[in-house]
Amino acid sequence: MTETRRIISDKKFLFFVLTIIVLNSLLFVKEQYDVLKEYEITDDVRVVAKEYKAQIKEYQKQPFSEALKTIEESKKKEDGNWGPKSYSMELVITQLTYLSSYDDYLNNIKENKKKYDRASIFADKGSYTYKNIQKTVEDFADCNANELSLENTLGIEAFFKFRLTEYLAIFVLFALCMRLIAERRNGLCNVIHSTPNGRGRLVFKRILILFVASILVNCILYGSNLLLSLYLYGGKESLFGSVQSIERFMKVQYSCTILRFLWKYLAVKCLGGMGVAMLVYMIFSFMSDVTVSMIIIGLFTVIEFILYKAVSIQSAFVFFKYNNLFGVIEYGELCGQYLNINLFGTPVNLVKVLMIIMITVLLLTVMLTMLWAMRSYPNEGTSRLLLAIKRLWERAYVIMTKAHFFGFEMFKSIFFQGGLLVTVLLIFVIKNGMAGDTTKVYDNRSIYLNQFYKDNEGKPVNEVSGYIAKVMAELEAYRKEKEAYEKQYALGKITYAEFEMIEHRFEYIESKENAVTDFQKSVDASSAYENKNKIRCSIVNPNGYERLIGETSFAEHRIFACKAIAFLILYCYVLFAYERQVKSSYILRAAERGRGAFIVRKVLQVVLVSIVIAVTLSGVEFYNINKLYGLPGRNSMLASLAWMRTKSYRITIEQFLMLIVIVRFLTLCCIGGGILSISVVVKKREQALLISLLLLLIPTLLVMGGIKQGQAVSFLLPLSVIELLLKSSWTQCIISYAICLLLGGLGLMVTCRVWNKSFER
């Protein structure tokens, strides 16, 4: 109980866990609204859920194929009225399409068996291929399409789509492992391990704490996600439906309810959390140096990640793709798949193999950790491996101490002040922020309009009149041809079937006419602006730029600002506070380069981190928009984009994008100056972090939450850049950035004055 009380009484750790729980819930809710934004739905999630439930209730009792035909007819009447009802209909149509095809999926499995039985190439009944086909049929024998039903499964699907919880749970357990070995950092390791209960019994208690913590953390995080999903979307009654009613779990080979499947999923996540936590704790137990342990854990994680991402599912090494650390963490991706692997000529289900490996690793880590704890004694000596690792670490430390002063400060920040963890977190955010292979779906008018922009990309606006006239002439010819066919049909010269085929040829004429009209208006507006302001305008497709630097990009830029401020705080809050907390500030100030030069090195770190954050996060934004929409015509003048004509910018689009990154970098440097002043004033790292969050990040979050009064003390708009430029005058923009520079300068002045002052008592 003493060890348990030590963990529970740690207010910092409890605050950290509570923060993770709240953050998990907030990000889960945010993702639900982000999904609607992707489909251009601005209504509340619960409004959409209410419409979706109404659609489900209307078609629930009908046969799937009949309900599908009925709702498709109803959907045609809603074309052009995009909103919650149309979106809900799309969801139900997708659901009914899957449900009506599930029986065909099962029949295909049986047909494949019969086909391969007849094929001579598979006549060898001892071959792996034959055994795999037989096993697949046997595994799906209990599945029945009659058990499927149309249910409100939107909440359950949202629960399984949210993947961040998997990493947050492991992050909490890792922090708990760090807390359990606190005596290593305090230098009490030998004292504690010299006591009668300081080895085997203590380790046994800690293993029990890890087991209980894994269950609690996973139950709380995943339980909160489930409750939130049911609150937002409803669907408690669907928990008793078949799990195969959800398309994501089409390949689940056993029959069970959604509720039972959720229990199994949670049990596996708890087991996986225990295994990962025990593996981390075992490495910490084996190594006397915490930093060396961190490096080994980092290398192991990188190798596992490479195997998970680089190995193809068709590769002979697929065993190593899923049976590793990330296969356990991202079990939510694997639980809905049906994969067999070849183990000595016998097909074995990959999920079962993963379960066996997880249990084996868990038992082995527990056994090895206990044996190591009972057989290791203080000052008994160290193994050759540990001595070699220690020598390498000492050699690296000596090299860095002899390196340039700035290099040593960076080394200290990365390996001793948490910079490595912040870097890993930044890489994780960048990786998850990268757009996948998503294809933007356009209506017919937009498709034609995009083609018009593509055909005339980069051309001056006064050179496209001929192209527009040509398109208009083609449309006029099509219209006359269509009228001629209508007359023939009215006179009975062609049948209805022939007329229907001809009508199909001309069904997109209206869309093309609307597109060329919009294109003409855009060209005319650009031409008028060019003649008035003498700024050359070119033809540029605005779709991608509207999402990148238009009014629709405001929300994304605000998220950028929050991320940037958070990462800057996490890296810089400790720069001076660390020196004061470990009582090295007096020694440093007494050194030859411990005052002015020392401050310069810290400021250079802030500048370097600001560059990295501004470039990487902005780069992810540009990459995503370019992949989803394209960013053509970057060498055209900025005035080629209609919404940018409110101010006379005489620069190209590419130069403007570079200017955004530079402004963000300079603003981050100013914020960094403020963080340094906080770090140098307080005496503890925790205080510096808390004050920095309260003064810099919390006002930004309040503004994002709709409290406009927080803009006066927030860096949100200066970091967003676009929102400030489009909504404010030049004077307001200059004042905003002048205030940023002033605050940054004041922060540096405070830093220099406090650090360089005399400490004579």
Image (cartoon, rainbow, N blue to C red):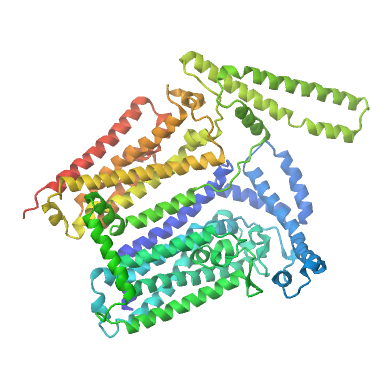
Locate residue 120 relative to residue 274 in the image: left or right. right
Q: Residue at x 68, y 47 (%)?
A: 89
Q: Residue at x 35, y 39 (%)?
A: 665
The answer to whether residue 584 is above or below residue 292 is above
Q: Position of residue 502 (x, y in %)?
A: 83, 31
Q: Residue at x 60, y 50 (%)?
A: 49
User: In the rendered view of the protein, which quadrant contains the C terminus?
Assistant: bottom left
Relative image position of residue 521 (x, y in whole percent)? 60, 21
**Taking 673 as reference, is 115 above or below it?**
below
Q: Position of residue 517 (x, y in %)?
A: 65, 23
State the residue lying farthest toward the left.
Answer: 761
Toward which corner of the image does residue 508 lie, by quadrant? top right
Residue 230 visible, this orientation: no
* Res. 390 image quadrant: bottom left
In the foreground, 183 or 611: 611
Pick out the residue farthest to the bottom.
196
- Depth check: 386 or 511 in front? 386
